[in-house]
């Protein structure tokens, strides 16, 4: 029988008096990248630490490839690679010494360790630093070593907790490319508080806020949900309001100034093109079109309210 690579059911965790996460469900069945998006303190690290067996949950279940993590942690953990928020690096070891140590720690058969080390180093672009002390690597390369230790035992699931945090812009680009590369033949779940990063990398998105899931679906569904529904148009020769309503998809109009109008539309992706066409045809002399983007805070607020509404409706 084919089990999901990761299945989390009804997961809740309480640190002393307060709940950090409540009733989290998550399922990953295929290779590729899932993004766990949430602001600081939302509960991402808590969820990841539990799914990797580093923290024992207060309630709920975690299955890795069908294995109950709390019943058979040894077998389950062989199938997971984990890069915690603070990479567990030993700065006074060389890259090779460290990866060998990690391979033994993962209970790998000694005979296959040398080949596995070469493969992990190759994939992470650190083969030329085999004998360098980790202390003497840049932040970006240290992160690559952290990712190499997470894949050395060829796990089906790799969990990366904010892997681009604290890196400079070039290093961020490189680490993102590496995440894409390692997700070609395994499932990767990574956490981030940056929406654009999740949009760039992931096929699936799970959003967590105040310890609860507020959205979980494909990236495509999410992008449709947050697609702009209004735009500001500035023209030297604006038409009467009625003329705008003849553009397909435009539903209403707000007068901002004499020359700038906000138009509301039904989320059509080619709205800019339609406005420009109409403008050129009718001589509106368009100077600027600005799509109103929703900020991540607004999206979280909308989704949290929606979730609350749904919960209220369900409980009636
Ligand atoms: N060891 C702990 N003891 C008590 N409370 C904790 C502990 N670790 C986390 N928390 C609290 O649990 C909540 C969730 O924290 P968590 O670290 O999981 O969030 P996060 O989304 O990973 O945020 P960040 O990106 O800031 O790490 C927060 O309110 C945090 O203050």
Image (cartoon, grey):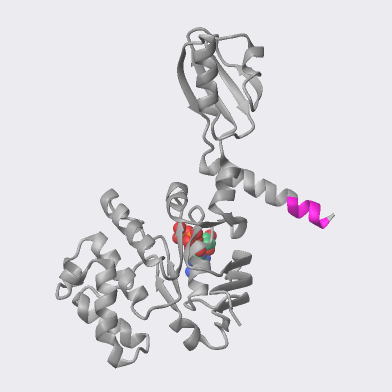
Say which residue appears at 28% left-offset and 67% top-offset.
124
Say which residue appears at 25% left-offset and 60% top-offset.
139
Image x and y of residue 267, in percent: 60, 35
Q: Nearer the viewer, residue 53 or 262?
A: 262
Look at the image and say whether residue 55 sits in the magenta stretch. no
Q: Nearer the viewer, residue 40 or 111?
A: 111
Q: Quadrant of residue 69?
A: bottom right
Position above or below: 289 against 219: above
Query: Number of labelled discs?
Result: 0
Image x and y of residue 191, in percent: 46, 60
Q: In this view, does 167 lie to the left or right of 35?
A: left
Seen as rendered, the residue at the extreme right is 316
Q: Which of 21 and 102 is in front in this view?
A: 102
* Quadrant assignment for the N terminus: bottom right
Q: Which of 229 and 243 is in front in this view?
A: 243
Position above or below: 137 against 239: below
Image x and y of residue 257, in percent: 55, 12
Say which residue appears at 48% left-offset and 23% top-offset.
289
Image x and y of residue 119, in percent: 28, 76
**Magenta-colored span:** 310-315
* Quadrant assignment for the C terminus: bottom right
Say which residue appears at 29% left-offset and 49% top-offset.
169
Position above or below: 140 against 80: above
Main structural element of the magenta stretch: helix, strand or loop? Answer: helix
């Amino acid at each position: 029988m084919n089990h999901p690579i990761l299945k989390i059911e009804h997961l809740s965790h309480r640190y002393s008096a307060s709940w950090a996460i409540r009733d989290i469900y998550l399922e990953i069945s295929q290779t590729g990248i899932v993004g766990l998006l949430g602001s600081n303190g939302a509960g991402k690290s808590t969820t990841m630490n539990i799914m990797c067996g580093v923290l024992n949950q207060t309630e709920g279940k975690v299955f890795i490839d069908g294995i109950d993590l709390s019943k058979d942690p040894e077998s389950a953990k062989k199938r997971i690679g984990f890069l915690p928020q603070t990479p567990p690096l030993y700065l006074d070891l060389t890259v090779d010494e460290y990866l060998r140590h990690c391979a033994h720690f993962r209970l790998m058969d000694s005979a296959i360790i040398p080949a596995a080390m070469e493969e992990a180093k190759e994939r992470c672009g650190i083969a030329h630093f085999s004998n360098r002390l980790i202390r003497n690597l840049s932040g970006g390369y240290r992160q690559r070593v952290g990712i190499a230790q997470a894949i050395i035992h060829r796990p089906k699931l790799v969990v990366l907790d904010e892997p681009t945090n604290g890196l400079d812009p070039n290093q961020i680009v490189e680490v993102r490319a590496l995440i894409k590369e390692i997700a070609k033949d395994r499932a990767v779940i990574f956490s981030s508080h940056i929406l654009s990063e999740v949009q760039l990398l992931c096929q699936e998105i799970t959003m967590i806020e105040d310890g609860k899931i507020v959205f979980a679906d494909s990236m495509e569904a999410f992008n449709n949900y947050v697609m702009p529904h209004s735009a500001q148009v500035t023209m030297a020769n604006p038409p009467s309001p009625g003329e705008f309503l003849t553009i397909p998809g435009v539903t209403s109009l707000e007068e901002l100034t004499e020359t700038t109008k906000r138009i509301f539309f039904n989320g059509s992706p080619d709205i800019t093109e339609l406005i420009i066409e109409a403008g050129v045809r009718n001589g509106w002399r368009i100077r600027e079109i600005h799509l109103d983007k929703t900020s991540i805070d607004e999206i979280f607020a909308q989704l949290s309210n929606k979730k609350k509404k749904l919960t209220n409706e369900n409980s009636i």
